[in-house]
Amino acid sequence: MIPGPVFAVTALSLLLAAPAYAASDAVAVSAAAVSAPTAAKAPGRADSPELSQIRLAVETFRRITAAARLQPGQRSDRLQKAGASGRTGSWHGRAFEYFRNDILDAVPHEVVQRGGDRNLRRRNQFGFTVNGPVVVPRLYNGRRSSFFTFSYEGTRERVGRSYLYTLPTAQQRFGDFSDLVDRAGRPRTIFDPRSTRRNPVHDPSARVSRSNPEYMRDAFPGNRIPGHRIDRVARAANELYPEPNTSVGPFLRNNYWSNPSERNTPDGFIARLDHNLGDTQKINVTARSSDGFSDTPDIYPTAGNFGRPDRLFRNRALTVSDSVSLTPNVTYNAQAGTDIQVVDTLSPVSGRNLPGELGLEGVNGSVFPALRFRGYVGLGPSQRSYLRNALAKIEISNNVIFRNGNHTWTVTSDTKFLSWSTYELDAPSGSFSFDDRITGLPGINNTGDGFATFLLGQAGRALATDQPQPTYLRRRAFENSVSDQWQVSPNLTLSVRVKIRADGPRLEKYDRQSSFDPAVTNPGAGSMGALVFAGLNGTGRAFQPFRVRTEPRLGLSWSPTASRNTVVRGTLLRTYSTVGLRTGPFATQGFTGRRLPLSRNRQLVPAVVLEDGFPPLPNPLPDLRGDFANNTDVDMIPRTGAQPTLSYGLVEIERKLPNGLTVRARGRTTRGRDMLIGGQIAGLNRAPIEVLAYRDRLNDESFRRSVRPYPHVQQIRMNYQYPGGKYRYDEGSLNLQKRTGDGLSFDLEYSYRNRWDDYSGPGIQNPRDRRTAWARTRGTRPQRFSLSYTYELPFGPGKSMLARSGLWTRLVSDWSVSGFTSWYSGDPIVLEPLFNNTGGTVPYLRVDAVPGADPHVRSPGPERWFNAEAFVDPPDFALGGVPRTHPTLRNPNLSNHDVALTKRVVLSQEQSVEVLVQSFNFLNHGNWRDPDTVIGPGGARNVNAGRIIGSRGGRVMQLGLRYHF
Amino acid sequence: MPVGVLTALALLLAPRGAAEVFKTPVWSDRPASSFEVVLDGSPATVQSVQSADTHLILLLVLDTVSRADRAAVARTAVIEKLADLGPKYYAGILTAQDGLEVQQAPIRGRKRLRQKLESLDVRGVPGLLDVVVQTSRIADETLGAADVRLAVLFLTDGEIEDYRGDYTIPVVNPSDRSDLSRRFRSQLILERVRSITDSLASAQAPLFFLHLARQYDDLNEVYQSGISEFARVTGGRALFAAGVQEIAAMAEQLLDEIAAHSVLTIEADCVGLHRLEVRADGASARHKEVVRCGQSGS
């Protein structure tokens, strides 16, 4: 027996002598093989010395592999520990914990700028993964045939979010608008709609103006609304509106800053089982499950919260796949999977009847109504916030791969079934918009106020929906393809694929769907255009055709030089996108109802007065009449067979360089047509732009309907299913990559891209002239630079520094630094007019350029990012001339730098611990927000136009510990 | 207590290493007698040299799971090149999927090798990360047993997401929107690569890799860099074919390198890892950068 101190000192000296893995390596030498070298030196038969040595080596190989049970027909039936055993015979995995706390973080820029000193963050993310052979003692031994993987992960998090909004001032909330100013800082007057009267001296031959108003109104004395005039419902809702708490400005704007926290508590697992049936067949079963609850931030600490409601998430997925090698040259794969995703914001809703508490009558919902005031942030979550959507997907795929000479053929067949069970409440408690027209001078910009209109309860637009049941949408799709990869010569390979795809139409399980049909006579109006219903009066179950398309693909790979260090690749491809299912009650009118009361003139009278309640539907649901949707927005599923079509081309040249470097240049282009757009952009019921000549007459609903193609309906909604857009995308990139060697690997890329289209962004002015809408795509950042890298610090055994073994070396070895750095140039600026006086005929209006004025500034900064004086609102009843997105002005650049430091501590050959220190945005760089792009007319410019309010972002630290076994 | 102190002193004052013998691959066209070896600045003795014209055993490890066409091209190229190399070249065949398995012990018969190679299915899940250390150990023990040259060539088409082990960190909870643990998704692969690289530092037989289907996504780039690292630390080389037309030439290149290597048997007083420098006629020869002595090998 070794005395204790002796043992301790011996162990210490051994520890200093060599790192831990070296010791484990010594153990790892196979017991079966240790005698081989000496035993094998004995001479065998009378071979030449060289031949006897090779025989000796082969014999040693046989002995080692037999001892490790690696010879054909042997199957490992025990957990082997010798050096010749592999890693597949035992269980492996990891356990981990990631930790974040705001003590470690920098205070975000947006919080510092509002005077805050912390942003709550408490986060623990934990879990484990284990994988290995399936072994049930005395029942089943699955080593080398059955394997499992099981991963669990959970998170417990509370994190702060930051918001900056504009609210009415404290005195405005009680009707005192004496402090009301416009965007230029000049006093703005509110008028009493009750005093509306025709101007007896109005000259109809001259334009409406302050000197020639068509209607006259009296200003509220002192710009104050008397208390008794405030609407009863508005007064109750107003109680739930918070007061301003900051003064960022300009003037009284950006006066509410909120820094609430949200909570997130997901738990989930992934379980996978592989089983080999003999040597040629493999079956895989994968199951996924995740449950989460997101307690979203209360931007207002009241029932009138503007933020989206709390959400429950559930995800379940099961996939079964089978792979069979029929012969060495023929493989068959089959897979069937189902995936269910549930998002639910209805279950967490409290039992309170909030419309009832406000005194709002005529609506069916119990949640807070959506109240929106022009110029201010509103009350209540936005439309379609309350939902319970379940997506179920079933996918079955088969493919056979076989090789014949220089050809490799692949035949595939895929079938997909998609089901959305969607109960997405559009506006269950009503959605109300209040603009400045009711409290302004009719036809005169920069008068009135949206919040003042709200206090009077007079909504210019109001919507309430009646949805007695969910909608069960279904769709099927099939794809079959044949492809061949042909090795024409050692330097040239061609690949060809032909895919035939068939996309089924949208169906509803109970045929509860309808669509506006422009070719059907409306029974109520007597003109063309009426609702038709699935499966009724000769209409089929579907409104869309079954689309069958052929998708060709051609590719080549060519080495132009004998050394084959250079490779040229090219691809040409045409694909078609699916006209997908979208959630919500779209195109179910008649089974669901949209109540959209109309104002006869939105300058003069409201659509709804809050305290009067919402008018009911004329008939109970279902109401399957062709004129059910008359005078409201109608939903239309386009019957066209067109679908989004993409033509794609790519050329790439890659060259290998010395020292593990590879350089790659790539160019690619895509052309898209029949891209899916919404009803607002399709504009099927928009009056021709020439009607702007009628000027103020367009404010009259009866006149406006007379100039619409389908007078008896308002908008024709398409739910982004109308195939009518075009786009073009071009990209060039240069990439330099270094594989590891001396501990450093990196991937450096610069790319330049341009995307143009005629439909993206907030909208287009004239749907009938789409060419004028062709512009750079909003949100596309043309230049990108990215660098990812990993560097293993050069300390420790085998490295260039501190190479000797020892305790100090163990401390400084096995450290590595990884990082991502990215930089993006700004995306195109979209300029917007402050006022839109087009009688409701041009929902989206562009601005005009001021002749001779340069929109650029010499040194762009937050005080002046661009020259707003170079733009101006267009005149009343006229279109703007500046392109939809500005051709040269860009929003600020964006950059980010993440770094991770990792220390690996080796416990044994198969066990290690990693200590992780990760820093996101480690330079604590604040990216500028986008500038204010609302311009204003010549006499009332938005003084904030071209300015940037603050920056955002901040360093976030994460500590992690991972144990690998 | 005195016993412990004396033992400790003895261990600390004792020479760090006894004379160790190990082998290492070298590429040089200079005569065998001209090799000079330096370990961390100290000269070491070259006991013997197996030059490039001596017998060689190639252990061919197949880890082909999905690309039957590419695997067939690679197998054909290897067989044809072996035929060119002549009778001094022996080859054995192993498979890596679901654990290492010997399909054919090293032999010289090309016809039998061809038949065996053509009978092997492209199937299963990749096993390279699981068997590379084990293969290296077998190769080292075989190399240590006789005065031969030996190299290992992996033919693989596996992608990192196809492994049974969880290296890609798939998202478990889609509702966890502020998850940053997957920002550095490659770290699990890096950890595994480091673990294997540590183990391979003591390897004496060079490992060569031909990846038949190079991938360009971030995770596979890290995985492929790891394979390059395995080759580098063992003195071998890794090549990655993006297109099928590159495979035959790459296989030929690797086998030419394998054929051209010499094996030095070195004797040195050392323990642990050391930086190796080999010169032939005063000029630097290509060799593995780090060797470990005293803990493994012959």
Image (cartoon, grey):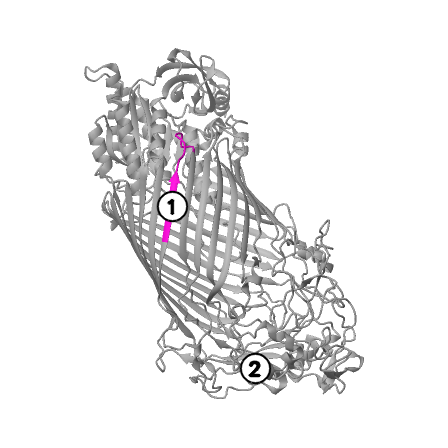
Can residue B44 be spotted in the picture? yes
What element does badge 1 sit on?
Answer: strand
Question: Does the segment drawn in magenta span residue A553?
Answer: yes
Q: Is residue B118 left or right of residue A213?
A: left
Question: Can you give x and y, in whole percent of width and height, for residue A381 in the image?
Answer: 58, 71
Q: Quadrant of residue A762?
A: bottom right
Q: Is residue A899 left or right of residue A335?
A: right
Mark 2 lies on residue: A706
Chain hosting mark 1: A
Residue in the foreground of this view, choosing between A943 and A789: A943
Residue in the foreground of this view, choosing between A693 and B48: A693
How far apart, in angstroms, are the residues tagged by discs 2 and 1?
55 Å
Question: Does the segment drawn in magenta span residue A616?
Answer: no
For residue A470, above or below residue A624 = above
Question: Can you give x and y, in whole percent of width and height, for residue A798 in the image?
Answer: 48, 27
Q: Is residue A871 left or right of residue B45?
A: right
Q: Residues within 10 Å of mark 1 (few under 14, many from 20)?
A: some
Label 2 and label 1 in one chain: yes
Q: Which residue is drawn at the image coordinates 57% and 73% (left, top)?
A: A688
**Of the residues shown, which amino acid type is indicated by label 1?**
Gly
Q: Earlier in the sequence, mark 2 or mark 1?
A: 1
Image quadrant occupied by the C terminus of chain A:
top left
Question: Can you give x and y, in whole percent of width and height, for residue A280 in the image?
Answer: 24, 46
Q: Is residue A792 left or right of residue A576?
A: right
Magenta range is A552-565
Q: Which residue is drawn at the image coordinates 54% and 61% (left, top)?
A: A758
Question: Can you give x and y, in whole percent of width and height, for residue A75 in the image?
Answer: 24, 40
Mark 1 lies on residue: A555
Q: Quadrant of residue A197?
A: bottom right
Q: Nearer the viewer, mark 2 or mark 1?
A: 2
Residue in the foreground of this view, choosing between A844 and A292: A844
**Of the residues shown, which amino acid type is indicated by label 2?**
Ser
